[in-house]
Amino acid sequence: MNYLLEVRQVSKCYGEERILNDVSLALAPGQALAITGPSGGGKTTLLSIIGLLQQATSGTVLIDGQDTGGLEPRQQTALRAAHFGFVFQRARLIHSLTALENVMVPAWLTREGKAAAARAQELLVRFGLAQRLDYRPQELSLGQLRRVALARALLLSPKVILADEPTNDLDPAAAAEVADSLLETCGRGTGLILVTHDPGLAGRTDRNLCLEQGRLIE
């Protein structure tokens, strides 16, 4: 099978503390995978290593079959921009920009054109934010911030979405909207890996893995 990404025996240590211990997983096109487990157990660290935001202490991360270990930083940055969309736990929006401008940030970094601007507006309308295009993050609710972050992640049609606690702190209605939007992308062939403490959301994915004492358990 051609996987979107593979993680092979990845370990991560901070000094003498081992956070991840020989972790392996693979993600196929259109597959949704949930990673659960206790807080502080390394789930966000694993997501960052998968997304090439952190370096593993040992092991291999392959993107479309390519070993990323020998890539220069600029090559990793280009691969990350082309392959991944990120939904961070704290949204990480730029407060001086409007909702529409925040969604456009990935396009500016990759020098995409007018088509990206049209898609950014289309995504915000689809997520119920048609009346909030010119609002800044401080003028939006937590649920609206998370939807702006999701639109930003989807802007360049990534092959894989990495979502860290995407429904955390949201009311049930907002959480359902964000979850539905994330899982809907899998129907178009996008891979999804999400970290969550929500058993209901984890139960809707194709695979549910638990990270305990640095190891993944099916």
Image: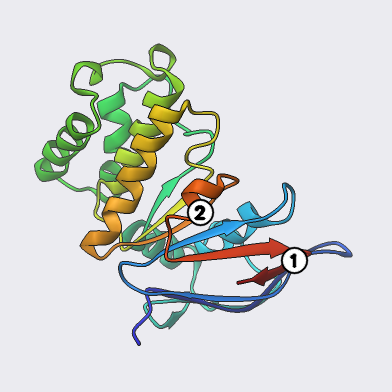
Task: Give the label on residue 123, or none.
Answer: none
Left or right: 37 with respect to 206?
Answer: right
Estimate the x, y position of residue 132 in percent, counting from the top left: 25, 18
Q: What kind of residue is marked 1? A: Gly
Q: Nearer the viewer, residue 82 or 6?
A: 6
**Which of the 4 image quadrants contains residue 23?**
bottom right
In the image, 32 versus 140, the foreground residue is 32
Q: Amino acid at mark 2?
A: Ala
Q: Residue at x 55, y 29 (%)?
A: 169
Q: Find the distance from the CA under tag 1 to the CA under tag 2.
A: 19 Å
Q: Quadrant of the C terminus?
A: bottom right
- Where does label 2 land, which residue? 202
Local secondary structure at mark 2: helix
Q: Residue at x 10, y 40 (%)?
A: 114
Mark 1 falls on what kind of element?
Answer: loop
Sequence-wise first label, 1 or 2: 2
Say which residue label 1 marks.
214
Q: Is residue 194 above or below residue 5?
A: above
Q: Residue furthest right?
A: 16
Decide if residue 186 is on the left or right side of residue 122: right
